[in-house]
Amino acid sequence: MFKETHSKEKLCEVIEGIDCLSQQGFSQIGSIARLSLLALESPGRSFGDSEDVASALKAIWSISENIQNSINCESEDVGCAYLDEGMLRRFDAIRSFENKS
């Protein structure tokens, strides 16, 4: 739920920050993915290169989690965080089941 107490300037600042985070993070993810594909498609590629690709995939995973968390924090600061209602229902169902056990 949006907090009515935030100024237009604050909201613009947060949106700009979110845009910056998404552009930087997704640009990094795209670059790493393209380089990984090029490595996989290169003739004469050795088996050892698989570790490079694995490291690239781990970097993609890490960057995506960091960007997701950063964007979520920015959104929460102004009361505009997305809530996955289905996920919350699943968590409630699991808690309910665990409390009965």
Image: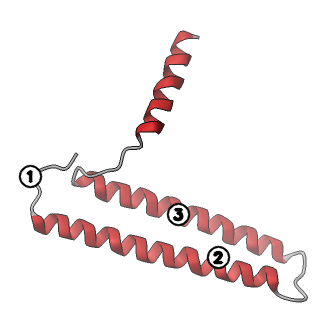
The answer to which quarter of the image holds residue 88 is top left
Q: How is the image coloured?
A: secondary structure
Residue 8, percent across and down? 11, 65
Left-right relation of 70 to 60: left
Question: Callout 1: helix, strand or loop?
Answer: loop
Residue at 90% over, 75% down: 47
Q: Tell me the distance, in whole angstroms, between the alpha carbons under discs 2 and 1.
A: 41 Å
Circle 1: residue type:
Thr
Q: To which residue does mark 1 refer?
A: 5
> SS of the residue at dot 3?
helix
Label 3: few (<14), some (14–19) or many (≥20) C-alpha neighbours in 10 Å: some
Q: Quadrant of residue 16?
A: bottom left
Q: Which of the two discs, 3 and 2, labels the residue nearer the N terminus?
A: 2
Q: Position of residue 92 (x, y in %)?
A: 46, 26
Residue 73 on image: x %, y %? 33, 55
Residue 93 vertical placement versus 13 (above, below): above
How many numbered discs sit on the rendered protein?
Answer: 3
* Label disc, if present, on residue 64 of the rendered structure: 3
Dot 1 or dot 3: first in sequence order is 1
| The N terminus sits in image quarter | top left
Q: Is the residue under label 3 in contact with that under label 1 (CB below 8 Å)?
A: no
Residue 59, horizontal then vertical, whole percent = 61, 68
SS for callout 2: helix
The residue singled out by tag 2 in the image is 33
* Side of 46 where 75 appears, left or right: left
Q: Residue at x 60, y 68 (%)?
A: 60
Relative to 21, residue 3 above or below: above
